Image (cartoon, rainbow, N blue to C red):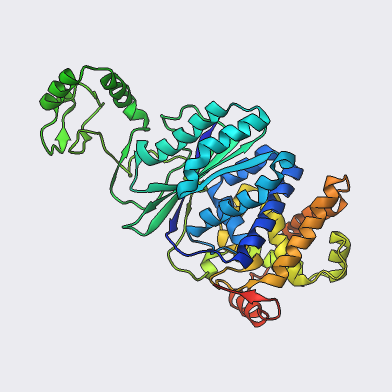
Amino acid sequence: MPKRTGVADLPLHTGTVPKWLADRMRDLGRLIAESIVENYGKKEFLVRLSDPLWFQSFGAVMGMDWHSSGITTSVMYALKRGLNPIARDLGIYVCGGRGKYSRETPNELMMIADKTGVDGNYLKRTSSLCAKVDNTAVQDGFQLYQHNFIITDEGDWAVVQQGMNVDARAARRYHWCSSNLRSFVEEPHAGVVGENRGQILNLTHQEARDTRSSILELAHENPDRMMREIRQIVAPNASIIKPAQLDLFEPPRDIVVSPDGLPVRSVRDPILLNSSRDCIMPTRHEVRAEDVDLKRLGGVLATAYESDPKDFESLLLTPGLGPRTLQSLTLVSEVINGTPSRFRDPARYSFAHGGKDGHPFPVPCHVYDESIRVLGTAIEKAKIGDREKLECLNRLHATQLAMEANCEPLADFDKTIEHEKAHSKEWGGKTV
């Protein structure tokens, strides 16, 4: 059963991702997805995608700007490019996209249905409902411009879609997953949270049940009778209507309505559940110490720099593996193996491969390529039954946790960034 699992509020950024980064994101995104499927199964990958904090961390570990709306478009484009060519083997397909590509989702779903035997008509209806709920049933000032539908060959699915508020220069990302949905039209959202921007129309609220029923009844009424009722009920530009005056809607108490007679609720009303899984990013570009769990970052750095490198050569079976690549692989391993509580500070994952805008430091392309090489080798060996290298990589996260538990000093945030920038040229650092 599906539910909407959370929301991310992000500053609206424009621009493009250069090919040198887009191709690396495609490759690393595919390998991380394959690792999760290999370790935990296809359904688990959909669960990860439906967690807004994990998704933000996933984008940051791939070198995107850690806080921006561009993570949504770029990550989903990278996954579509990376996963669809291997979809028959992996069993995961990515549909839709931004703008005109979102409108191709129904056709793509029907083609997948022909290949896999899943119910294409159900999936088309599900895709449309998710978009309609976030764009129409809840009118929060954000207009959808991106819709991605991720489907397995077993019929499980996730939706990642994003809306834009041009006036506020903000974007809002919505996540859905095919588990635990009671209803598409009543309280489908496990979490919706963001900055208070005034009143919104929320026809999915449980107290709007009678309103939804009345709307359905109106759709079957004689238009002449309906217009007579409306003239009696709604005066022009009405602001407050008493329940006794509102026979069609029958709300339980006074309700604010818009000039067209539709009920409006405030974002302060209790429609928010499980908001701890939601994600609100600042407008500034730079990463600050307060954005990062410095103890956890200290565990990453201790794992990479303070242990005997020979121990990690044995662990990862990769002779000559340097500490800087271990730093990236440690964070990649956490994205693959970490529990939900590990992703409350997405900025920390930008310490794997930096950010294309130079924050917290330029993307170290040589290190990025090494991360792809090591992870790719582990996946390929696992496919032919040799899981030793992949298990070693997975144990890197366990090593990090042990280091973190015994790492008394916090990471020196300023020195860490200074070190990265000092070696940026050596590591092939690039920015946009």
The location of residue 43, given as percent across then percent down, is: 66, 37
The location of residue 110, given as percent across then percent down, is: 57, 32
Out of 83 and 356, give the one closest to the viewer: 83
Q: Residue at point 23% right, 29% down? A: 253
Q: Residue at point 47% right, 45% down? A: 275
Residue 106 in sight in this render: yes
Compared to residue 89, the image places residue 228 above or below, namely above
> Which of the 4 image quarters holds residue 403?
bottom right
Out of 328 and 154, give the one closest to the viewer: 154
Out of 308 and 219, give the one closest to the viewer: 219
The location of residue 234, given as percent across then percent down, is: 14, 30
Compared to residue 196, the image places residue 412 above or below, namely below
User: For the N terminus, which image quadrant?
Assistant: top right
Judge from the rendering whether residue 410 lies leftward or rightward of residue 169; answer left or right. Answer: right
> Which of the 4 image quarters holds residue 22?
bottom right
User: For the C terminus, which image quadrant?
Assistant: bottom right
Judge from the rendering whether residue 309 lies leftward or rightward of residue 137; answer left or right. Answer: right
The location of residue 313, given as percent across then percent down, is: 86, 65
Q: How many marks?
A: 0
Out of 143 and 177, give the one closest to the viewer: 143
Residue 174 in sight in this render: no
Judge from the rendering whether residue 380 lies leftward or rightward of residue 41; answer left or right. Answer: right
Q: Residue at point 37% right, 29% down? A: 206
Q: Residue at point 60% right, 43% down? A: 94
